[in-house]
Amino acid sequence: MSTEQYNGYSNHETWVMATQIANNEALYNKVRECYFDGYKAYGTMLCVLRDFSRTLPKGQLTVDFRNDNVRAKEITKLIEDLFNPNKPAPKRRKKNATTNKA
């Protein structure tokens, strides 16, 4: 385990979990289901996710839901960003209109 930042996350384990949630359709759908069933934080849905992971074919997930190095706060923020319909969209920078002077 490294203490260096990894692709915007505090460590490699957290990045792997975030990547799996965002890119594995089965896991994404299960996390979404948990979120809308009231499990808003990653820590509260861990038991459900552990049970769910046992139902998947071997090798489909590359994450360990028992890994204490995964930063729950960062994964909860990801989940909130993915599924909270009331969260405002990020503000975009307005491009300055440029005029061509001939």
Image (spheres, rainbow, N blue to C red):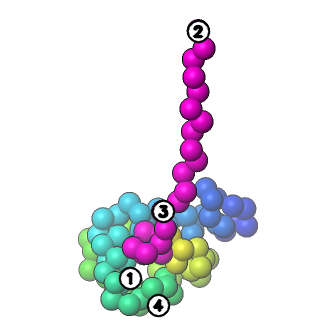
The mark lying in front, picked from 4 and 3, is: 3
Question: Residue 102: which numbered mark, if any?
Answer: 2
Mark positioned earlier in the residue sequence (2 or 4): 4
Which badge, 1 or 4, comes first in the chain's sequence? 1
SS at circle 2: loop
Q: Mark 3 or mark 1, which is nearer to you?
A: 3
The picture places residue 61, in percent across and down from the top left corner, at 37, 68
> Would residue 31 appear left or right of 40 to someone viewing this image?
left
Going from N to C along the chain, the mark reached first, 1 or 2, is: 1
- Amino acid type shown at disc 1: Tyr
Mark 3 sits on what residue? 89
Q: Is residue 95 magenta?
A: yes
Q: Are marks 1 and 4 in contact (CB under 8 Å)?
A: no
Question: Residue at left 41%, top 88%?
Answer: 39
Of the two numbered discs 3 and 2 in the rendering, the one whose residue sits closer to the viewer: 2
Query: What residue appears at the point 56 percent right and 44 percent down from the top-left corner?
Result: 94
Q: Is residue 68 magenta?
A: no
Magenta segment main secondary structure: loop
Q: Determine the image quadrant of residue 57.
A: bottom left
Classed neighbour count for the residue bearing mark 4: other residues with Cα under 10 Å, few (<14), some (14–19), many (≥20): some
Real-space Cα separation, disc 4 to disc 3, in angstroms: 26 Å
Viewer can see residue 90: yes
> Disc 4 marks which residue?
44
| Mark 2 → mark 4, Cα distance in angstroms | 63 Å
